[in-house]
Amino acid sequence: MAPVHCLPPEILGYIFQLINLEQLDRRGHDGAPPLTYVSHVCERWRQIALDMQELWARWPRYRTADENWTLLCCLRATSAPLDLNWHIGSRYLPRVRHTLPHASRARSLDIHIYMDYTPDTCAFWHDEALPALSVPFPLLEDFSFISTEESEDYHARHLVSSLFGGICPPRLGTIFLSFCEALQSCPIYSASLQHLQVYNTRAWANVDDMIQLFQSIPKLESFEYALDSPYYNKYTFDPTPSQRYPLRAVTMDRLKSFSLRESRFVPGITIFCYLALPANASISFCCTRHEEVEEMDANELTQALEHMRLGTDALKQHFASALSQGMPYFHSIEIEAMYVRPLHHPDEEDRERLPQFICLQAPLAHTRNMLIRAEPCLMTALQPVFLRASYIRLKWLGLRRHSHRWYSLWINMHRYLRVTQLHLHGTNAVHFVDYLRIWERSAALSVPLFPLLKTIRLSDFDFTQKMSGWIMDAQDDERPFAVQFGDATNKIYGSSSFFTCIAVGTSCKGYEEAVEQLRLCLGEDRVQLDDEV
């Protein structure tokens, strides 16, 4: 077998290319180009490396002693598509300046406006960078623009219609925008766009503008939206419902993932309301924790409640459409804090037809004025597609932190009529006892709770901690918690022909004694140890 240095040039070039791609993920634009060393092994390898322009096509080079590596790369990649990363800050201007004449060859363009936006930086951006950006970019596939909230320069935060010579790059498939304004008049929303991330960015002025923008990008496959800036008013839009378009007005047949990441609730859910997603699309709602009902005025609260109802309707329509297309109901769900997510349970027969991921956060459910309002619960955990679940895992964390939260869910748990398996993680065992005691004495709650319940699993709970004062109306009950749990469970389910057992996981602290105490309440056959939870 010939030694590696004697391999044919095309084989060596292919090896160099694979190694280069692996190194780029780790080093990016920092230091010398990752495969510089192969050009110093021997004359033959050097010639192969120098002939491969893609090895030298990431500009500028940062974290180097001087600009020489950037200049050398400019000389070695004279015609190849480029991966440009512009740091617009006073320290980096000389390096970026070397790349400006070649900007139109960019395959990817990442622009980051730094906070040290000095007069020199401002002049560079206006007089040199913007003219370089005002020509067509026919090769551009990936565009990222990150500005800074501190900048008062209009052109450092607004992408205007003259960008790219007013011509939308035909290959542009991925966009990331942050702390800026980029309305539809900006030529970046290509008909071939596949991935769009909008973080603290104003991309439309109102709902109708938003609908029209999404109509122009029908091939979109993933969308992420975040609005968590303290200065969110700079980046938000008018969320007043459209008078021209119905809910789910824009058909997005190719969208595989819709994600709200730390978004203020009203703008985020408004976007979802007007998009018709395919049945197998992954959906994630995450609202910013900084948003509090107590800080809203009457108009803001009214608007939030109105949009919860709109969101409820849009979700119902989405899941109804998905079910009509063959998506099965979710048979297994998890509720953690204010999040609801379906699970792909090991017994699930329809895994391939289900979305890979759905996680819905109940909006504003953590604030006092929303504790017993039905809207957050109806929008998420009480969606009809979840109510047929036979397996529920309750995974709220922290007894004191969450014991008072989302109370409206507990008083509506009786709607889950088909539950046969209930998994109580951590301190949910305490909430469950509270709930059973309320249920037992409330004549108004005539519908039985989980009438088909067969098993209760307990995991990650500390049976050794003192519970006195932590359980509702049980401040004087000094019995061990396992006895209280067993007694409350026996009163509700002891006579049920369906109920079989409580399974105590070995992840619980004090599980051995707890098993014995539970057996005193429920009998030997109805309590068992489970080493799988």
Image: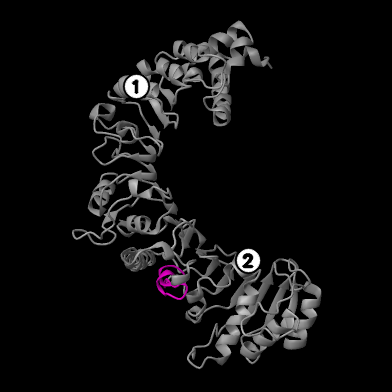
User: Split into 4 quadrants, where in the image is the N terminus?
Assistant: top right
Tell me the number on the disc at residue 398.
Answer: 2
Image x and y of residue 13, in percent: 54, 18
Comparing 18 with 226, the one in front is 226
Judged by depth in the image, the label closer to the viewer, 2 or 1, is 1
Vertical position of residue 469 compared to residue 41: above or below: below
Residue under the image location 40 percent in, 68 percent down: 379
Amino acid type indicated by mark 1: Ala
Vertical position of residue 467 compared to residue 259: above or below: below
Query: What secondary structure is marked by label 1?
Result: helix
Q: Is tag 2's residue or tag 1's residue first in the polypeptide sequence?
A: 1
- Could you tell me how far apart the alpha carbons at marks 2 and 1 are, in whole angstroms? 53 Å
Q: Around disc 2, counting alpha carbons within 10 Å, would you say few (fewer than 14), some (14 to 19), or many (20 or more)? A: few
- The residue range painted magenta reads 371-384
Image x and y of residue 226, in percent: 42, 49
Colouring convention used in this rendered image of the protein? one colour
| Residue 275 shows in this picture | yes
| Predominant secondary structure, magenta span | loop
> Extreme left residue here?
244
Q: Is 302 included in the stretch rendered in magenta?
A: no
Tell me the number on the disc at residue 123.
Answer: 1
Count the labels in the image: 2
Image x and y of residue 239, in percent: 29, 57
Task: Tell me the quarter of the picture where residue 462 sits.
Answer: bottom right
Residue under the image location 28 percent in, 47 percent down: 204
Residue under the image location 36 percent in, 44 percent down: 201
Comparing 493 with 477, the one in front is 477
Amino acid type indicated by mark 2: Gly
As drawn, is 519 to the left or to the right of 160? Answer: right
